[in-house]
C-alpha cells in the first residue's frame, strides 16, 4: 500500500463560521460581524477587500456572461429549496410522512422493511439507490465526530448553532462534472456546471435520506449551503480517493472534477476502507496547480499538520478574492490537474502505474505537458487578501 496523507490526530472539528463563504455574508454594523472579527481579527482586512467586489455570477465580475449567470443563480435557487427542506419538517408533513419520520427522526413507524435488513442488506440498498439517483461512485465511512462542524455558519438563521448529529455512519456520493465544462474554468460556464452538479447531488442525497427514514432510520442529507459535516475527509475515509495539493478530493477514476454529497444515518452499515492510489505522492512532485493558481493560494511546499491531519495549507482568502474578481468559482486547479482526464484505457494504465510506484511520476508529468499543454501560467492577480 502506497503512503497517503497521514492523520496522527487528535482531529479537531472545523468551525463553519470561519469559512470564507460564511464570512462573506457578514454585514458590517451587526453584532455577528463584530463578534467574528473580535475572535479573528486576522480575517478583517482580507474580508473587507473581498466584500467590496461584485458577488459571484453578478454583473461586474470579469467573466460575467448573462446566460451562464442565469443558469448558476437558478440552479442554486433550486438547491436552496432542497437545502431548506433537509432542515425542517415542512417537507415531511407536506408529503405525508408519518410523525416521527420528519427531519431525520426515523424510529418506530417505518413505512417499509427491506427483505434483507442486515447491515449488508441495508448497505447494498443505500449504495444501489445512490447510483440509481445519479452518483458516479459511493462509499460508506463511520461518522468521525471530528468531521462534524463545531459550530454552524450557514444558513444564516443557524449561525453559531452547535450541530447535534448523533448518526453513526456517512454515505458519501461522488458526482462527476462534465469534462468540457471543467476544461473551461475559470469561465462562467464552468461554474454553471458546478451549480448543476450541486443541484443533482442535493436532489439525490435528499431522496436517499428520505428513503432511509422510510425504513425507520434517522437520516439527514448534507447539501450545498446546509452541511453539518465536512465532505472531503469523509470521502477519504469512505475509500473514494485522496486529498490533493489543491485541497479537494481526487477520485482515482474520475479525477479532480467531482462534487460530493453526504447522507448521514444512524444505522449499522458495512464500511469501506480508506485507500491509497499514490495520489498524494504524485502531488509532491507535480505542483502544477500551485504554479498555475492565479491567486497564489496553493502552496508548493510539503504538507503540514492542520487540526490533526496532514494536508497542504491553502489560503482560502486568496482563492475567494480571486473568485470575486472573476465572478466565477475559477476551477483552474481542477482543470490543470493531471488526474482530471477521461477514463480511457491509457489513463487507467497511467493511474495504475502511479498507484504501484512513484518512479515514473516525473515522466508522466512530462507527458501531461506534452499531450495536454503546459497550461501557460495565468497573470497573477494583485491586491489579494490572506
Ligand atoms: S484561485 Fe482558482 S486555482 Fe487557485 S485555489 Fe482557487 S480555484 Fe484553485
Ligand atoms: S495539479 Fe498536481 S499537485 Fe495539484 S492536485 Fe493535481 S496532481 Fe496534485
Image: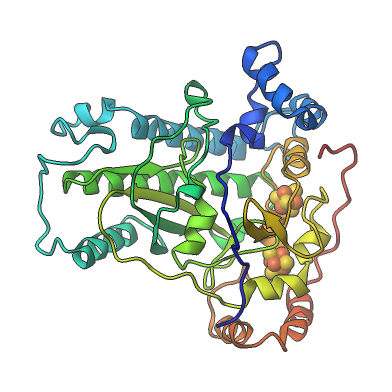
Give the residue at x 54% y 38%: 71
Q: Position of residue 176 (x, y in %)?
A: 50, 60
Left or right position of 250 against 336: left
- Residue sitting nearer the eye, 122 or 346: 122
Given the current orientation, which residue lies at the most extreme top position? 29
258 on left or right of 291: left
Look at the image and tell me in which quarter the C terminus lies.
top right
Q: Residue at x 33, y 61 (%)?
A: 131
Where is residue 171 shown, x and y percent of the image? Answer: 37, 56
Asked whether the viewer can see residue 53, the reply is no
Say which of 73 and 303 sits in front.
303
x and y, in percent, of residue 367 in the image: 75, 82
Above or below 118: residue 259 = above
- Ligand 2 falls in which quarter? bottom right
- The answer to which image quadrant residue 376 occupies is bottom right
Which image quarter is the N terminus in?
Answer: bottom right
Establish if 135 lies above or below 196: below
Q: Is residue 100 above or below residue 248?
A: above
Color scheme of the displayed model: rainbow
Q: Residue at x 63, y 73 (%)?
A: 279
Q: Residue at x 85, y 55 (%)?
A: 378
Q: Residue furthest front?
A: 10
Query: Whole-percent x and y of residue 157?
Result: 48, 21
The quadrant holding residue 22 is top right
**Can see residue 78?**
yes
Q: How many marks?
A: 0
Amino acid at each position: 500500500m502506497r503512503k497517503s496523507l497521514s492523520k496522527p490526530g487528535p482531529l479537531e472539528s472545523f468551525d463553519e463560521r470561519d469559512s470564507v463563504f460564511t464570512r462573506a455574508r457578514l454585514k458590517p454594523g451587526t453584532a455577528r460581524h463584530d463578534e467574528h472579527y473580535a475572535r479573528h481579527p486576522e480575517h478583517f482586512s482580507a474580508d473587507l477587500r473581498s466584500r467590496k467586489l461584485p458577488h459571484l455570477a453578478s454583473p461586474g465580475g470579469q467573466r460575467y456572461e448573462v446566460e451562464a449567470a442565469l443558469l448558476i443563480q437558478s440552479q442554486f435557487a433550486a438547491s436552496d429549496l432542497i437545502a431548506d427542506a433537509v432542515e425542517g419538517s415542512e417537507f415531511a408533513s407536506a408529503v405525508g410522512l408519518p410523525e416521527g419520520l420528519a427531519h431525520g427522526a426515523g424510529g418506530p413507524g417505518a413505512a417499509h422493511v427491506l427483505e434483507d435488513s442486515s447491515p449488508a442488506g441495508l448497505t447494498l440498498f443505500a449504495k444501489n439507490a445512490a447510483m440509481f439517483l445519479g452518483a458516479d461512485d459511493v462509499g460508506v465511512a463511520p461518522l468521525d465526530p471530528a468531521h462534524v462542524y463545531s459550530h454552524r455558519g450557514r444558513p444564516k438563521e443557524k449561525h453559531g448553532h452547535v450541530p447535534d448529529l448523533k448518526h453513526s455512519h456517512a454515505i458519501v456520493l461522488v458526482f462527476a462534472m462534465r469534462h468540457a465544462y471543467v476544461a473551461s474554468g475559470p469561465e462562467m460556464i464552468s461554474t454553471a456546471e458546478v451549480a448543476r452538479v450541486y443541484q443533482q447531488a442535493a436532489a439525490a442525497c435528499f431522496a436517499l435520506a428520505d428513503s432511509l427514514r422510510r425504513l425507520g432510520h434517522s437520516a439527514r442529507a448534507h447539501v450545498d449551503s446546509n452541511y453539518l459535516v465536512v465532505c472531503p475527509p469523509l470521502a477519504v475515509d469512505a475509500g473514494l480517493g485522496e486529498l490533493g495539493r489543491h485541497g479537494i478530493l481526487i477520485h482515482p477514476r474520475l479525477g479532480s472534477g467531482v462534487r460530493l454529497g453526504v447522507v448521514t444515518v444512524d444505522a449499522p452499515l458495512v464500511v469501506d476502507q480508506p485507500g491509497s492510489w499514490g495520489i498524494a505522492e504524485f502531488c509532491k512532485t507535480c505542483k502544477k496547480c500551485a504554479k498555475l493558481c492565479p491567486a497564489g493560494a496553493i502552496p508548493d511546499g510539503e504538507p503540514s499538520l492542520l487540526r490533526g491531519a496532514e494536508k497542504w495549507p491553502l489560503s482560502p482568502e486568496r482563492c475567494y478574492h480571486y473568485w470575486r474578481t472573476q465572478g466565477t468559482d475559477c476551477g483552474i486547479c481542477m482543470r490543470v490537474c493531471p488526474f482530471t482526464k477521461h477514463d480511457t484505457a491509457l489513463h487507467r494504465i497511467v493511474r495504475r502505474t502511479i498507484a504501484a510506484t512513484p518512479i515514473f511520476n516525473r515522466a508522466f508529468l512530462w507527458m501531461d505537458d506534452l499531450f495536454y499543454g503546459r497550461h501557460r501560467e495565468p497573470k497573477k492577480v494583485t491586491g489579494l487578501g490572506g
